[in-house]
């Protein structure tokens, strides 16, 4: 069950994910320039001075990538964590309570999921000021519906077990059952799901920023950097492909790790 | 067709309508539910009180929500989508030609993606666990994780800048012939196809493999029926219902893809119009576009369910 026995792709994926997190945490201290300082010409090629070249207004691309990684991962982390807390709590609550509470919550989630998330997010963002708080709240609210479905299904499976029945007969409260009986028994699939939702959040935030409706300039983030440098493509300048590739590598890596985690869970189930 | 079957389909149809109705309430009343002052957000901090009051009157924010909503819905049912805030044009006039363009882009993509996904899925099953199957499955897993703009700009870099085969900006207008139009949308179509293909192909493969493990397939194998005949004559017909389902669900996904792809290629479709008006905070246009996206999305999902009911008799008798 140790990580040493995991597949090559899972190990590679995990190493890459850890690298990204490190860049987000300590990168800004190592970045050669400030994220919004204009330090060179427009779209300068790769050089000793600018390791990844410069962007559409002459800012150092490497520094912006480093700050962008921090901004992108931080917002995605906040949104996913919030969505998880909310989704798991309501999902478990619906499964344990049953009856009309379950019905109301489930129908609400059905309704929210009958509509593409991106379109919904854009409708809301046309009505509220766009800043970090609103972005995190919008992303978390829309994403929590998916977490709700999974958490509810997992809790349904667990809540018919004898030990939950025993806890109920002992007279334990709903919250006690949720945290002490159901959560510990559903942890691994939930962690896998967290990884998956996190990479979706990164992708989603980047899409919003790419459309100009996410992180607002001059702050750097991946989607926004693709947008800023998109025009360069027609002159053969590949600056916009760097943040896009960073994003693609991260999502692929997370998928590799999640694949391994899910395999682990299903083999656990078989053994048990 | 039995009356019971008709009743099931009718029920599913009603459920779709009901969902659309509920979504329309959400879209329209989001301005009401959200905290803060929408008029203030639209105009920004420097707005004068008179401007604010005018905009509130124009958006009808000083009327009761129920009355505004019924007026809005009534207008839509008569084909009147309201008036844009910024340029004062009727919203229907703005959306009309753009809707056609988006429909064209999405249909061409679907016409390429659906047969291709099914053929690739069948190939993967035919060479199951051989190198070809593994190659296809690794490639599709990677493809699922790639963002639309990465694929789009890569295609532009190679096909329009390096090799100059297709234009990087997909401008279309009414005077273009079908051939010119197809050349213009080649790259956006390729991007959309790429994005939905992987998922459809994997589901097709899974659906057929699922059927392939049934006893009657083993029977056919033991009889010595050729592998190709087994897939086409025995497995495919029984896997067709989940395949249709995944195809239609992915067509619905094209709606989200279309928004981003149209922005990448500056294609004059509804997705671009939608995004532009979200930035301009032109609420009537945003709400009308969102409602149309919702109608198409819900309609396609409803279609998927109805086709599943028709294709799989077991679903006709819900527990």
Image (cartoon, coloured by chain):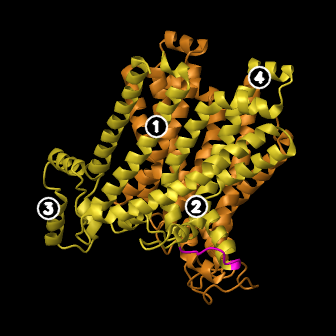
Mark 3 or mark 1, earlier in chain = 3
Cα distance in 3D space between marks 1 and 4: 30 Å
Instruction: Sort mark 3 into few (<14), some (14-19) or many (20+) by Cα contacts within 10 Å.
Output: few
- Which residue corresponds to mark 4? B217
Label 4 in the same subunit as label 3: yes
Mark 2 or mark 1, earlier in chain = 2
Dot 2: chain letter: B
Q: Quadrant of residue A220?
A: bottom right
Determine the colour of chain A.
orange
Cα distance in 3D space between marks 2 and 3: 43 Å
Label 3 in the same subunit as label 1: yes
- Which residue corresponds to mark 3? B57
> Are the two marked residues, 2 and 1, in contact with CB atoms closer than 8 angstroms?
no
Determine the colour of chain B.
yellow
- Which residue corresponds to mark 2? B189
Dot 3: chain letter: B
> Are the two marked residues, 3 and 1, in contact with CB atoms closer than 8 angstroms?
no
Is A190 left, or right, of B31 in this rendering? Answer: right
- Could you say whether the residue bearing mark 3 is in a helix, strand or loop? helix
Label 2 in the same subunit as label 1: yes
């Amino acid at each position: 069950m140790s990580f040493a026995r995991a597949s090559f792709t899972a190990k590679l994926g995990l190493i890459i994910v850890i690298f990204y997190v490190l860049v987000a945490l300590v990168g800004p201290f190592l970045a050669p320039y400030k994220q919004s300082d204009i330090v060179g010409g427009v779209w300068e090629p790769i050089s000793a001075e600018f390791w990844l070249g410069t962007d559409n207004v002459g800012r150092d691309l490497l520094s912006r990538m480093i700050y962008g990684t921090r901004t992108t991962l931080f917002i995605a982390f906040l949104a996913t964590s919030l969505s998880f807390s909310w989704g798991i709590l309501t999902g478990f609550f619906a499964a344990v309570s049953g009856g009309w509470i379950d019905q109301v919550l489930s129908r609400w989630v059905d309704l929210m999921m009958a509509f593409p998330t991106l379109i919904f997010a854009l409708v809301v963002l046309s009505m509220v000021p766009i800043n970090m708080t609103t972005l995190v709240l919008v992303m978390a609210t829309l994403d929590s519906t998916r977490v709700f479905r999974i958490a509810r299904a997992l809790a349904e499976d667990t809540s018919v077990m004898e030990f939950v029945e025993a806890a109920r007969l002992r007279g334990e409260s709903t919250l006690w059952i949720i945290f002490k009986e159901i959560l510990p028994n559903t942890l691994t699939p939930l962690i896998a799901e967290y990884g998956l939702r996190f990479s979706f959040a990164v992708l989603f935030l980047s899409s919003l920023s790419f459309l100009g409706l996410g992180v607002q300039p001059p702050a750097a983030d991946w989607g926004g950097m693709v947008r800023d440098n998109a025009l360069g493509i027609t002159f053969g300048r590949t600056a916009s492909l760097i943040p896009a590739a960073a994003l693609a590598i991260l999502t692929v890596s997370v998928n590799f790790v999640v694949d391994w985690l899910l395999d682990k869970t299903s083999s656990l189930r078989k053994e048990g | 067709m039995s009356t019971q079957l008709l009743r099931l389909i009718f029920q599913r149809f009603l459920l779709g309508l009901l969902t659309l109705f509920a979504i329309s309430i959400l879209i329209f009343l989001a301005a009401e539910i959200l905290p803060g002052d929408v008029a203030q957000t639209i105009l920004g901090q420097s707005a004068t009180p008179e401007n604010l009051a005018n905009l509130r009157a124009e958006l009808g924010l000083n009327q009761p929500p129920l009355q505004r909503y019924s007026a809005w819905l009534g207008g839509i049912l008569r084909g009147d989508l309201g008036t844009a805030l910024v340029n004062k044009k009727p919203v229907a006039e703005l959306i009309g030609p753009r809707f056609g363009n988006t429909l064209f882009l999405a249909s061409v993509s679907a016409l390429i993606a659906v047969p291709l996904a099914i053929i690739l899925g069948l190939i993967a099953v035919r060479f199951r666990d051989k190198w070809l199957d593994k190659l296809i499955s690794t490639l599709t897993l990677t493809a699922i994780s790639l963002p639309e703009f990465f694929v789009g700009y890569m295609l532009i870099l190679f096909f329009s800048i390096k090799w100059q085969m297709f234009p990087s900006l997909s401008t279309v207008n009414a005077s273009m012939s079908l051939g010119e139009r197809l050349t213009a949308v080649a790259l956006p179509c390729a991007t959309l196809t790429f994005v939905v293909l992987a998922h459809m192909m994997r589901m097709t493969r899974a659906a057929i493999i699922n059927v392939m493990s049934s006893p009657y397939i083993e029977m056919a194998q033991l009889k010595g029926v050729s592998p190709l005949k087994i897939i086409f004559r025995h497995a495919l017909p029984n896997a067709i219902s989940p395949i249709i389902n995944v195809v239609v669900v992915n067509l619905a996904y094209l709606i989200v893809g279309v928004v981003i792809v149209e922005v990448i290629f500056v294609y004059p479709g509804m997705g671009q119009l939608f995004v532009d008006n979200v930035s301009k905070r032109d609420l009537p246009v945003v709400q009308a576009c969102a409602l149309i996206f919702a109608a198409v999305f819900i309609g396609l999902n409803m279609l998927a369910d109805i086709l599943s009911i028709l294709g799989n008799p077991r679903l006709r008798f819900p527990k």
